[in-house]
Amino acid sequence: MKGSTSSWRWLVMKKRHFLFDGVICGAKMKQLPFMGFVCTIMLFVIYRTTNYQHQQTEMDSKLYPFETSKEELGVVTTGSDRLPRGIIEPRSDLELKPLWSSSKSKKIERSSCNLLAMPVGIKQKKNVNAIVKKFLRENFTIILFHYDGNLDGWSDMEWSSEAVHIVAHNQTKWWFAKRFLHPAVVSIYDYIFLWDEDLGVNHFHPGRYLEIVKSAGLEISQPALDPNSTGIHHRITIRNRMKIFHRRVYEARGSTKCSDDSEGPPCTGPLSFPGQGIVTKITLRFVEGMAPVFSRSAWECAWHLIQNDLVHGWGVDMKLGYCAQGDRTKKVGVVDSEYVVHQSIQTLGGPSAKKISNPEEAAKSHTVDVRSEIRRQSTIELQTFNQRWERSVKDDGKWVDPFPSTRKRKLRRKRKRSSSKI
């Protein structure tokens, strides 16, 4: 009897254990769809969060195309961050607008937008008139920087009301450009011509020039200089009659040796700034300061390279290759088929003082040789710019020079200095 009772108890316990296991198993089976649902919700939340962050990043890049990361600069955000995003207008332009919608002001339909910016003085009125007329025919926007303070003298020009006029006495092209051609202001323009006023344009056509620049893929360029031009500082900018454009010059004079292996200025690459202007070579690597032409992307970089307090621009020319949006041996060039004559007329600051042979008379006159003083200041600025560049390269541990030839030259200089100390 006892045996049967214990057997019965064992069966009951086993049944209970089986039922308990079944309940647990059933509960687990019921949880599987629930866990799947929870995982789906979590994945959806992660996806929406990531997608929202991506959209915010894209919106920021569109609204603030020229801003550096505020976190990197450690700057406290102010101003536009207090506004709703949709109302923010981060760009501007130099287009003249009518005062009312029915105004009879001439409205020009543009397939592309390009800008001519030029420092001008009243003494060069005739030459400036010839330049402006050529560019207006190609629907360029014109901005004139009046460095002599004379604005009224231009009111009789038929195109005067179509141009933007800015007046600041005795300021250079680079002073004006840094203050009035911010990338956000000129972002609608495909190309920016930053020219001097003393260029002869009888053999130059802006439309044909841009066709060549676009087909050659040049980001920084200049028209070639007629061999009869005065004030030519670099051979690479002289017109080659046999080519449409060039990116390189071959030369073996003194310490300057230019060959196929040369990868930097003045054989190829950036621009050079003699006096008021820059020189560009499209034997592809060098441009002078009197007639540079920048693409929108190249100007965004070049504007940041121009130093606010160094108004003569010396030294910037040799670094413009870094703004060429790629290989400076291919993206910088001089257009030969569309060329200009550089007259090298020095007007900024006035003419040089006449030399007085008698030292006593010179001491009494107390005259200042303006041109000599400007050249002296330009030389000081060149030294300052080069020092800033070297210091910036040294301090920025993340920056890597994209041009191997430059790195090699630096290594050679270091070795020379080390050997000279020994």
Image (spheres, helix red, strand yellow):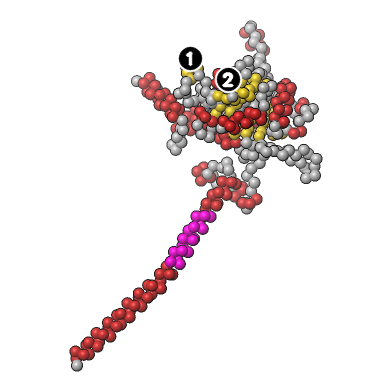
User: Is residue 319 found left or right of 39 in the rendered image?
Assistant: right
Magenta: main secondary structure: helix
- Secondary-structure class at tag 2: loop
> The residue under label 1 is which amino acid type?
Gly
Any part of residue 129 in sight:
yes
Numbered circle sitting on residue 297: none
Numbered-mark total? 2
Which residue shows up at 45% across the image and 67% down it?
37
- Circle 2 packing at 10 Å, graded few (<14), some (14-19), many (20+), is few
Q: Amino acid at mark 2?
A: Met
Mark 1 highlights which residue?
254
Q: Closest to the observer: 305 or 102? A: 102
Looking at this view, is 79 or 132 the one in front? 132
Q: Quadrant of the N terminus?
A: bottom left
The quadrant in which residue 378 appears is top right
Residue shown at 22% from the left, 90% from the top: 5
Residue 185 visible in the snapshot: no
What residue occupies the far bottom of the structure in this picture? 1
Q: From the image, which quarter does the C terminus lie in?
A: top left
Between 287 and 110, the residue placed more toward the observer is 110
Using the image, tell me which numbered label, if any, was put on residue 242: 2
- Residue 122 in the image: state x and y as whole percent: 73, 23
Query: What span is in magenta?
Result: 36-52
Judge left or right: residue 105 versus residue 365.
right
Q: Does the magenta segment cover residue 37?
A: yes
